[in-house]
Amino acid sequence: MLVDSHCHLDFPDFAEERATIVARALAAGIGRMVTISTRVRRFQQILEIAETFNEVYCSVGTHPHNAAEELDVTADELVRLSSHPKVVAIGEAGLDYFYDKAPRDAQAQGFRTHIAAARRTGLPLVIHSRDADDDMAAILEDETGKGAFPFILHCFSSGRRLAEVGVALGGYVSFSGILTFKNSAELRDIAADVPRGRLLVETDAPYLAPIPYRGKRNEPAYVANTAKVLAETIGVSETEIADITTGNFFRLFTKMPRPDMAAG
């Protein structure tokens, strides 16, 4: 079994055929999917999707692009919303200096609010970081000094130092379809050095479809393609990479019921 630790099933790209997309993922051996929140004010839409499908769970949080719109979201609110049985993570939150769609101080403020919620709940924080390696590392080190919290560096495409800092602080590193791209040799080198006990795979669907689907709409079933390349990168079989990444997933996402414990 594989797990898609990060997708966006609420996005319009899937609106007309969400059930078909989920069914295709299940047929491909993807036993769990986490659909990730980008706006707390739209959380009910995410939750409804998670409640519709046994194998789909969700997070609650504000993407850095939307940080300025939701600075009124408090750690208390995140903690309260995360009490729902289907909510297994906080985020995604973090820093995005590539698009800079929100002021950087707003991004940092929102990120620290989400860290506080992750620390209080014990739920993993799904971290978005793009072109912000130094500030991200500094915040992670500062906040971990106040008290550890579980986290995942999602859709990792940053530099080696951030991966090393994340692992040193107890975090996990998740790779998306970017890992399969021909020009991603440096990223594969980083992935090869991440401890096997900290590796995860994801799609970030509908974005970043892996080879051979690059340029098309991504979907959870395609996480198998990324897992295949990750297996080749670290020198294990596809069965082994499924065991490694799925085991890591359940170790990090502690609230997620394992298939033999879940209805359906």
Image (cartoon, rainbow, N blue to C red):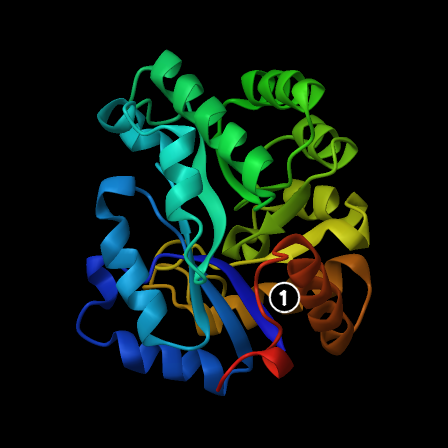
The answer to whether 53 appears left or right of 164 in the picture is left
Q: Nearer the viewer, residue 173 or 257?
A: 257
User: Where on the picture, by quarter, is residue 245?
Assistant: bottom right
Residue furthest to the top in view is 105
Q: Decide: is 91 above or below 209.
A: above
Asked whether residue 9 appears in the rendered view, the answer is yes
* Image location (x, y in percent) of residue 228: 65, 69
Image spot of residue 78 (x, y percent):
40, 38
The answer to whether 209 is drawn above or below residue 110 in the figure is below
In the displayed structure, 174 sits above or below 201; it is above
Residue ID at (35%, 59%):
215
| The image quarter in which residue 168 lies | top right
Query: Number of callouts in the render?
Result: 1
- The residue under the point 38% across, 84% down is 23
The amino acid type found where label 1 is placed reads: Ala
Q: Where residue 43 sits: x, y (%)?
A: 28, 49
Which residue lies under the disc numbered 1? Answer: 227
23 lies left or right of 258:
left
Nearest the viewer among 226 and 147 is 147
Q: Residue sitting at 33 percent across and 43 percent down?
A: 38
For mark 1, does the 10 Å Cα neighbourhood hold few (<14), some (14 to 19), or many (20 or more) residues?
many
Q: Secondary structure at mark 1?
A: helix
Residue 153 seen anywhere in this rendered image of the structure = no
Task: Pinpoint residue 65: horizontal percent, then vertical percent.
Answer: 31, 31
**Which residue is at the front of the view, 48 or 249?**
48
Task: Please identify the quadrant where the N terminus is shown.
Answer: bottom right
The residue positioned 46% from the left and 32% from the top of the image is: 114
